[in-house]
């Protein structure tokens, strides 16, 4: 059995009530904790894309992919490695920031990380950043020197690099026609 590590799955599903519950129950029944979960519409209103991150080894992730693929509302499941996938997350961080040098320093730090100041009040700044895990971890580590009042994360979203898409190998070619010739 291999070493357990963070694995990223992109799952294409029917956009209908109960599908997310069905997917998450499968992970729960198998004893996996979902580390990150993001769900959203795609370019086709009848289809949603779920991005899940879970810690497991190579053997068990392959079993999960096979079990997910058998579910009726699932069109396709793809494992995305760092090499073949682009991963990003949105994080908003509210930091205590009294007026003066501390506020200026926080604004400079946000600038260095290409983050945005999305809210300013008398006692706090809210910083938003979109990036990969390394970039976000770096910013949070630096901001922890100040007083972080609140932090919220969207969960990782991921997309295949290059021209390859999740539509390229659905359960059966042509089974789900979204007006694309690749199916």
Image (cartoon, rainbow, N blue to C red):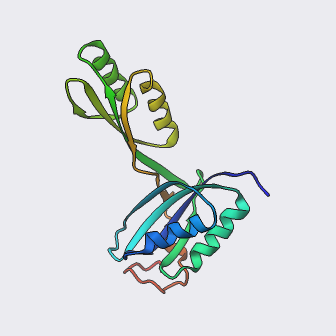
Furthest-right residue in this view: 1
Which is nearer the eye, 173 or 73? 73
Furthest-bottom residue in this view: 175
Residue 123 place in picture, x, y as percent: 24, 24
Q: Residue 61, relative to residue 117: is it above or below? A: below
The residue positioned 63% from the left and 62% from the top of the image is 31
Quick check: 28 left or right of 113? right
The residue positioned 48% from the left and 86% from the top of the image is 174
Residue 78 place in picture, x, y as percent: 57, 66
- Please tell me in which quadrant of the rendered image residue 39 appears: bottom left
Quarter of the figure with the N terminus: bottom right
Q: Residue 140, relative to residue 161: is it above or below? A: above
Is there any visible trace of residue 31 in the rendered image?
yes
Is there any visible trace of residue 162 in the rendered image?
no
Residue 111 place in picture, x, y as percent: 34, 28
Quick check: 117 left or right of 172? left
The residue positioned 40% from the left and 70% from the top of the image is 48
Q: Residue 143, relative to residue 26: is it above or below? A: above
Which is nearer the eye, 17 or 28? 28
- Please tell me in which quadrant of the rendered image residue 68 appears: bottom right
Q: Residue 156, relative to residue 13: is it above or below? A: above
Residue 183 place in picture, x, y as percent: 48, 80
């Amino acid at each position: 059995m291999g070493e357990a590590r963070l694995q990223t799955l992109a799952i294409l599903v029917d956009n209908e009530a109960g599908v997310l519950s069905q997917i998450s129950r499968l992970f729960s029944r198998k004893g996996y904790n979902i580390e990150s979960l993001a769900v959203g519409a795609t370019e086709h209103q009848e289809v949603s894309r779920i991005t899940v991150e879970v810690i497991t080894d190579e053997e068990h992730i392959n079993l999960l992919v096979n079990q997910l693929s058998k579910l009726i509302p699932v069109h396709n499941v793809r494992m995305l490695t760092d090499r073949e996938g682009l991963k990003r997350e949105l994080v908003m961080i509210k930091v205590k920031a009294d007026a003066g040098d501390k506020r200026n320093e926080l604004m400079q730090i946000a600038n260095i990380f290409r983050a945005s100041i999305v809210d300013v009040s008398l006692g706090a700044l809210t910083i938003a950043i979109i990036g990969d895990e390394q970039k976000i971890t770096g910013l949070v580590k630096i901001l922890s020197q100040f007083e972080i009042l609140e932090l919220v994360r969207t969960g990782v979203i991921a997309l295949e690099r290059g021209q390859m898409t999740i539509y390229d190998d659905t359960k059966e070619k042509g089974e789900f026609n979204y007006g694309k010739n690749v199916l």
